[in-house]
Amino acid sequence: MARPVYIHEFIDIIGHNRARYMHHMTANWCPVARAERNQLCLGVWATLGSTGHWPEVVNMWELDGWDGLAANFSHETGGGKDQDPSLAEWWATAASLRRGGVDRIVVPEPWTRDVTTLVADGVRGALYAHELVTAPVGTIGEYLDALAREGKPAVEALGLEAVGAYRVAMVNDSEAVVIWAIPDWTTWVRFEQAWSGTGELEAWRKITLGLRADWRRTLLIDSPLSPLRIGRQPEESDRLPLDQVR
């Protein structure tokens, strides 16, 4: 199998439809995507609104390398269409729940585990820290190397666990996504407090300052059928009528 490539999505939700949208993505989309596109779900999460944009959902989809991504796009645009005709009804429902979003193609760092391994290893968070990292053009690799060497051990010593670090493709080596699983709210408080003064992450923060790296951190909560929550990919048997989803 090729090294995975991921589609990362920020989705803007219309009104009170977030729960229905997350169910539509997991129970209604994942089984089809897995069968037709060999596409796996890494996660579908709700952004905790007090820490970022709201109402918002974050999706990540795992493909079998760049060739798998290209095959996915070819399937979606087959016959000169801008979307898969077989999913017209699914798209119509999704469009009634969301207004748009922003997608990125991201490539995992060598130490980042794929979703099958994450599930097998029991990686799970009561919440997740999602960091969108920016650095001067051409230097995000330096940040990611430092993260693997210095940042990851320092953060995990506080009780968090790295879901993964992902270099954003199709930009000039200047952006990355990093996701941490956090076991409970007490650990999150300790993590946030560790960044200032004489906290446990002060040395790592100084390294990031030297690299002129910045990040925007938000908190995510698993959707009910997110693979890291249920320990498997969503199945057709998980489906419910959307009017029953709250």
Image: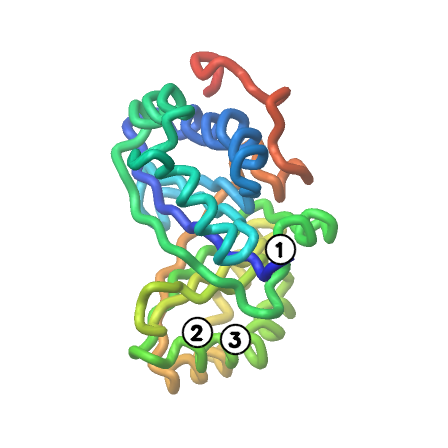
Residue at which label 2 appears: 196
Which of the labelled discs sits on residue 114, or is there none?
A: 1
Q: CA distance from mark 1 to mark 3?
A: 18 Å
Q: Nearer the viewer, residue 46 or 225?
A: 225
What is the secondary structure assignment of the residue under circle 3? helix
Q: Residue at x 66, y 52 (%)?
A: 118
Q: Nearer the viewer, mark 1 or mark 2?
A: 1
- In the rendered structure, which amino acid carries the disc numbered 2? Ser
- The residue pinned by badge 3 equals 147
At mark 1, the secondary structure is loop
**Can I make out residue 160 in this image?**
no
Foreground residue among 62 and 150: 62
Q: Position of residue 174 (x, y in %)?
A: 34, 72
Looking at the image, do the residues carrying marks 1 and 3 touch, with CB atoms under 8 Å apart? no
In-front residue for pair 156/140? 140
Which label was assigned to residue 25? Answer: none
Q: CA distance from mark 1 to mark 2?
A: 32 Å
Q: Residue at x 56, y 52 (%)?
A: 64
- C-beta proximity under 8 Å, tags 1 and 2: no
